[in-house]
Amino acid sequence: KLPEPLSETDLHDLCASFEAAVVEVLTKKLDTAVQESGEEFIAISGGVSCNAALRRSCQKLAEDRNWRLQMASPEFTTDNAAMIAFAAAARRYAGVAGSPLNTDIDPTLTLGNSA
C-alpha cells in the first residue's frame, strides 16, 4: 500500500525543515573554513546565495565574527557567472597568472597552484 500524500501543511513544514538544516550546515562550514583560513573578507556568490535564509544566517555570522562580507545581489545569483568572475578576480589579485586558451583543463587545480 502506498503512503498517503502529505498535507499541504506537512509539505510546507518538511520544506522549511530541510531549508533550515541546509542553512545550518552551510553556515557552520563557512565558519570553519574562515577560521581555518584566517581570512576575514568573505565573498558569497552563486545560485544558492539567493536564498534569503542563508543570506541572513551568513550576515549574522559575519557580524558576530567581525568579518567583511560581500554577497552578490540576488539579481546576479541565478547564474554562476558572477561566481566564476569573482574567482578569476581573486586569482588575479593573488598574482596567479592566467593560462593560455589551449591549456588542458585541470579540475583539481587550486588557487595556490600556478596555471
Image (spheres, helix red, strand yellow):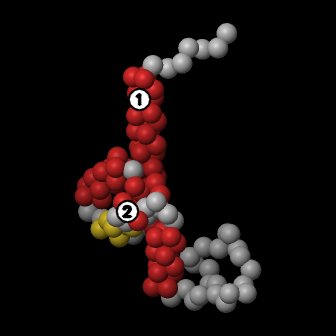
| Res 81 label | none
- Label 2 Cα crowd, 10 Å radius (few <14 / some 14-19 / many 20+): few
| Res 75 label | 2
For image coordinates 40% across by 38% down, the residue present is 20
The answer to whether residue 106 is above or below residue 3 is below
The answer to whether 53 appears left or right of 63 in the picture is right
Which corner quadrant of the image does residue 75 belong to? bottom left
Cα separation between marks 2 and 1: 25 Å
The amino acid type found where label 1 is placed reads His
Task: List the residue tagged with mark 1.
Answer: 12
Tally the marks: 2
Q: Position of residue 96 (x, y in %)?
A: 55, 86
Residue 71 visible in the displayed image = no
Residue with the most extreme top position: 1
Q: Earlier in the sequence, mark 2 or mark 1?
A: 1
The answer to whether 19 appears left or right of 61 in the picture is right
The answer to whether residue 27 is above or below residue 4 is below
> Considering the numbered disc 1 on the image, is that residue within a helix, a strand or a loop?
helix
Q: Position of residue 48 (x, y in %)?
A: 46, 54
The answer to whether 5 appears left or right of 99 in the picture is left
The amino acid type found where label 2 is placed reads Glu
Q: For this rendering, which residue is in front, 37 or 72?
A: 72
Quadrant for the N terminus in the image: top right
